Amino acid sequence: MSEEFSPNIIAFACNWCAYAAADLAGVSRFQYPPNLRIIRVMCSGQVNPNFILKSLEEGADGVLVAG
Amino acid sequence: MHTLADVNSVQGEAGDFQVTLNKRPRYVDPDKCIACGTCAEKCPAKMVDEFNEGLSKRKAIYVPYAQAVPLKYAIDADHCIYFKKGKCRACEKYCPTEAIDFGDTEREVTLNAGAVILAAGFQTFDPSSLDLYQYDQSPNVVTGMEFERLLSANGPYQGHLIRPSDHEEPKKIAWLQCVGSRDINRCQRPYCSAVCCMYAVKEAVVAKEHTPGLDTAIFYMDIRTYGKDFEKYYDRAREEEGVRFVRSRIHSVLEDPETRNLHLSYFTENGELQTEEFDMVVLSVGMETTPEFQRLSQDLGVELDTEQLVSTRDFTPVQTSRPGVFVCGALQEPKDIPTSVMEASAAACGAEVELSRARGTQAQSKVFPQERDVSSEPPRIGVFVCNCGVNIGGIVDVPQVAEYVRNLPHVAYVQENLFSCSQDTQDQMKQIIMEKGLNRVVVAACTPRTHEALFQETLLDAGLNKYLFEMANIRNQCSWVHSKEKDRATDKAKDLVQMAVTRARNLQPLPQPTVPVDNRALVIGGGAAGMTAALGLAEQGFYTYLLEKQDRLGGNAGFLTSTRQGEAIPQRVEAMSQQVQSHGMIEVLTQAEISEASGFVGNFQTRVSHGGQERDLEHGVIIISVGASEHTPQEYEYGQSDRVLTHLELDRAFAESDTRVTQARSVTFVQCVGSREPDRPYCSKVCCTHSIKAALRFKEMNPETQVYVLYRDIRTYGQREDLYHEARRKGVVFIRFDLENKPTVEQSEGKLDVRVRDHILQRELILESDLVVLASAIARPSEEPLAQMYKLPVNEDNFFMEAHAKLRPVEFATDGIFLAGLAHYPKPIEESIAQAQAAASRAATVLCREQYTVEGLVSRVDEALCRGCGECEQACPYNAIAVEEVEPGQYRARVRAAMCKGCGACAVACPTGAASVYNFEEQTILNMMQAALN
């Protein structure tokens, strides 16, 4: 059986909201695919457009900025 | 914090209360419980989940909801099988930390307190007694609170909007307003519950987001979106989202026995009976105090009014009838979150004044050892991988993760922990850090949001700077969310730990400098709000400068007659003004203008011109209470006839017993003059109540006087509804008009003819009036020098913008600057006073400190790269970075660390890479990203 495509996703999550929401998803035991890597930032305003471009360049299939 | 506690009694008096509590047993040791949830998973006893409004089940051992504080389990003894049948104890068997204690018992606790604040909240009205709504008969008739749970991601259907009867997606939903509010015929709830219009509009909009194409209709009497930015939301719901609004009276709800759909019959405004079918009906139920609180209030000696709400007076809005006992929130009157939060701070202000002499007497501070200088050492990273019992270890292969980490560069030590957060592990970690000479620490466990501070304290105990710490979130964001994919969860955990180790390698020790705090305050604006704020601070012992532009104190309050409860405003304001002027801790500067301002929290400098002199004031905080003013109408013959008055003019005419008022035999009020119009879309909030109070005054002077109120929606929210009811009872005639069909005023033979189209009679009326009173808007000037000077944001309507509408309603995003009164939004005097007390309370949290500790995670500017362009200054929301002239012609950006929140907006805006945030440098983040994708 051929392996299903699983995209590598980088998320930049604001410490005060989106990161907290990801924690709450855990407390609530919501299940989601394990191909997401969350990087905590102190504000989504800290996410330089460069971070997104570099992530795609380094092999990320998708980038999520959440804040 | 005392949970599971019931108040038995409050003895004593203000300044010295003895409060006796009954603490019910939790049967779980909160010091041991790590909230892993294993107990609830194993517990065989299922019961109705109250948090989800009975729409789902929970276990007998439970936390009420995912964000509960403290996040500790408790056993519901009424449903626990062991307590009922004497055997089971499954939770005890499986608990990894031996936290279960079946021997726990009820205890009595006595506390000494100088002040008491009542914040016992509300319950929603139970619509079972009103059979026209079929609430008990049809599962598809739900309350607004139940609908909230249906929409919630942690609700009974995980946020998938389906109806209870058949779990099908509804296509049409109706909201019925005022269920258990504004109703004295079917239930004794005369007051308006103040929040239901907004929550119904919100639920309709959110429901449409959940289910595209959903038809939503709100059946209402008046839409009461009177709060800040509420009207805008209502307009958007109606015009852009397509929520239907149907002005009506409900006749009945009948369930179709086959489809379980609901036939809603209602009377339209012109009396026609209509019927429409819906898949679901949501009852917008009102708020009330609980019977438990009503009983407790008697024991406390706190007076309730006839509506079973805590009695307060308009000039002391959070003071109960018992001295030293304060109240906030819906216990006092139905109200929304922003107002409740504001009142909570106001109640705290009352308590602070009461307790100011005792401030700091019971504070303890911890002393840490001298910090070790690690700047010349290469990174030696210690990694502690937590099993969290089976929470992580049961899914993620922790030994494999530990083994993987051991081989990463600069990792000097790796250890697996069963529970990293337990006290013995903390002690052990401290020893290891010292013995192994570690200079960076990574804990792979739960989330930094709850545990970072705890581990940072361990570092401090071990003589390391607290910023040399990083967490990898392998529980909340890994094992808990990937419990069915153990191998991939293990791979992810390895990546997460590697990312953390990568960041740890770049971490630098950061200083936390302290700055001294000047404990004087500056209050700008000497109206009711400004004077209240000044007194709130001065009574706590903080010296306060009160600036007023005019030559007298009092602001708009000086022109008003009485509060909604009938307290005489001029006398109270005069007394307040005297108290302010004679207070030893308040210095009043009238005819004062601010010409220059600088500084930051704890250290502001303000230059004031006052009486022809310039004065430099130094102070630690600023409260902005500059007010607003009455809009000058451009319509309805205003300015053309001296018998067309605004509200303030009417109040003055009352005060002076002007014959235009005393001899008027027919008076017409016109509402929404300059409010809720395209140019000024917000509701001015106070006008409906003010008009109705004035209408009643005319009726009291002479019951034969014809009084008309022409309105669009009557917005006598909360207990102001009682006035509306009284006005109708006394014969005041209310006639509704639409924005498209506004009334007109014409002068004719010394009288004023007001023409308006009556919706019920379906014809035009001519109201011959001796006097026309215009409910003119409350407005702010479009130019505000203070906003420029302190870099404070204003909204589209020129009102100052608080840091967060709900959570920080009296603070600006810039530290040390606070907001109260009409400058925030139109509001009645009782709310201005509460807000000013709240601002004083929040300001006191700064002023009570001798020094202010500056966080380490702030921005920095590399001066060699900075060219002084000012992009960072534009981007900063906190006024924390500014371009300064360092030498003639040379400009550089400088960070005011005390005001910086480390958001990094400056770093993104900076075109040269000069600005960055310590320990979140661009390269650090990119390295983490690379580690994630390796």
Image (cartoon, coloured by chain):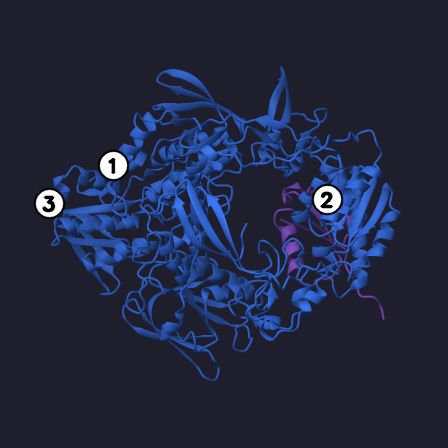
The numbered mark 3 sits on a residue in which chain? B
Distance Cα–Cα, label 2 vs label 3 = 74 Å
In this orientation, does residue B864 appear? yes
What residue appears at the point 40 percent right and 38 percent down from the top-left corner? B823
Colour seen for chain A:
purple
The amino acid sitting under disc 3 is: Gln
Residue receiving disc 2: A51
Q: Residues within 10 Å of mark 1 (few under 14, many from 20)?
A: some
The numbered mark 1 sits on a residue in which chain? B
B700 lies above or below B617 = below
Image-based side of B764 in relation to B242, left or right = left
Which residue is at the front of the view, B237 or B462?
Answer: B462
Residue B693 screen position, x and y as percent? 24, 49
- CB atoms of marks 2 and 3 within 8 Å: no
Residue B523 screen position, x and y as percent? 42, 30
Q: Which chain is blue?
A: B
- CB atoms of marks 1 and 3 within 8 Å: no
Residue receiving disc 1: B570
The amino acid sitting under disc 2 is: Phe
Mark 3 residue element: loop
